[in-house]
Image: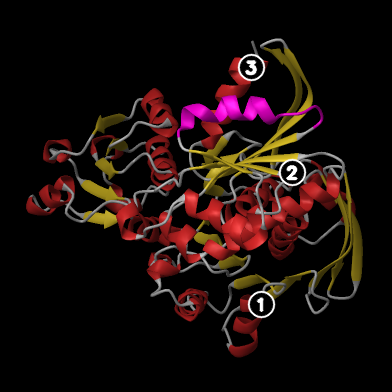
Amino acid sequence: MLNNNLFLNINKKKFIIHFIGIGGIGMSSLAEFLFLSGYNITGSDIYFNFRIKYLLSLGIKIYKNHSKNNILGVNLVIYSSAVDLFNSEIISAKFYGIPVLKRIEFISELLKFYHIITVIGSHGKTTTTSLVFDLFLNNNIEINCINGGNIKSINSYIYLSDSKYFLLEIDESDGIFLYLKPTYVILTNIDYDHLNNYSYKINNLIKYFINFLNNIPFYGYLIACIDNFFVNKILENNIFKCNIITYGFNKNSKFFISNFVQKNNISYFTLNINKLNSYNLIINLFGKFNVLNTVASICLLSIFRNIDFFDLQKSLYFLKGVSRRSEIIGEFSFFYNNKSYNNILFMIDYGHHPTEINYILKSIYNIWKNRKLIMVFQPHRFSRTKILFNEFSYVLSKVNILLLLNIYSANENKSDYFISSKDLLYNMYDTYGYNNCILIDKKKNLISNLLNIINDNCIVLFQGAGYIDLILFKFIDKYINN
């Protein structure tokens, strides 16, 4: 549980912490963590999503919409990075002299009493965090955790313990991660993403990563994947004061991966450590990206435990990962409207960047070579779609059949970017001659289009970070579970 010395030994039950924008994954997870630690939590949001409904079920008071009245009697206000500084609750809190903190500012204060373990990078943060958590618990190492996705092994985004270690993934999207001073960092990769917050220059993003890594103390550890071009350049050109462990398929890695073989949805590989010891390992997760995420977790474990092959393989067997990341929902047969649908494999993946989509496509085509792939894709953010327009067009044109939804705004204004899913459709055709894309202008038309094109033995992949998971599970409930 949270250290009793936090916040000057205040009375937790009487100390009210209010969250503005409580429905976001990061905000809701932190609110839940503090509530279960004994603090009095309230919150507000414009929309009531599944996370808010869950928090309500715990007994947390949440207001729909923002109002200056929501913060009356509150002792501390925490706000999401998606919240405008002209928000009525922020203005009112400042007027009444109530402390107002960004989420990451509060977390940096909260974690001063812990050894911080962070996972950072453009891709794979949430999955790697969940694998670290599983691997530690499977090896009897207690740890606190806040994750950006549902950890399947515990069916939760959070875990509380009496441990002095605190594990969390860190989002690099807007530079505020520099508030944290971690002891252990896993750096998965750096890619062209969120550049609208870095003056559209990758070098600016890289400088922020370097500054963050310089926060690691001399007794701390940086675990870095040198398969990634930018990570490799950072390590070549910068001398960090901490210990460094490298991993990857790159032969120069201290934890070098070789002999990768994919059989169905199981991955086999050899892990070579410091060119001294080799272990033939198996994980019940598919794709090279999941092998990399797993090995990053093993690197971290090696700091806390001597690696024993039998114990390691046993604990790897129980790795479950995180929901919505290359997750196989199931293979189903069903009958609807006088038509039978046989052996349809449904999958869901949260990836919303061209690199992530390419990872999942390569893995699917490698494992299920003779099955047609139908992808339901929802682009995430106008800014990302515009900046990576050509990259999206290229990777999506590899899909057998694509059902393309409108762009999920994620609080961005369409008028600021002048981009739409229709532009992607036209560019895929003009550039690659790709004509297997169906544009879904209205969400209600998705299911009818999907039922028209599904064939026996095909794969249906719901891809993206918006609300498509809700559509998938509604589809399964209506057409398969009935």
Pick the front one: 17 or 329: 329
Q: Is residue 458 left or right of residue 280?
A: left
Residue 319 is marked as 2
Q: Given the image, on which type of amino acid does mark 3 rest?
A: Tyr
What color scheme is it?
secondary structure
Q: Residue at x 59, y 33 (%)?
A: 155
Residue 396 higher or lower than 63, as above or below: below
| Residue behind mark 3 | 479
Pick whichever, 31 or 353, lies toward us.
353
* Residues under numbered marks 1 and 2 in contact, where contact means CB atoms less than 8 Å apart: no
Q: Position of residue 453 (x, y in %)?
A: 69, 30
Q: Which numbered disc, 1 or 3, marks the residue closer to the eye? A: 3
Marks 1, 2: nearer the viewer: 1
Relative image position of residue 1 (x, y in whole percent): 47, 43
Residue 200 seen in the current view: yes
What SS does tag 1 mark?
helix
Q: Is residue 456 magenta?
A: yes
Under circle 3, the secondary element is helix
Packing grade of label 1 (10 A; few <14, some 14-19, many >=20) is: few
Which residue matches tag 1? 229
Amino acid found under the numbered disc labelled 2? Leu
**Quarter of the rendering containing residue 51:** top left
Residue type highlighted by circle 1: Phe
The alpha-carbon separation of the residues under discs 3 and 2 comes to: 31 Å
Which of the marked residues, 3 or 2, is nearer the chain's N terminus?
2
In x, y percent, where is residue 287? 77, 52
Look at the image and tell me in which quarter the C terminus lies. Answer: top right
Of mark 1 and mark 2, the one earlier in the sequence is 1
Marks 1 and 2, how far apart at CA: 28 Å
- How many marks can you see? 3
The mark closer to the camera, 3 or 2, is: 3
Q: Point out the stretch of residues depicted in magenta.
A: 442-457
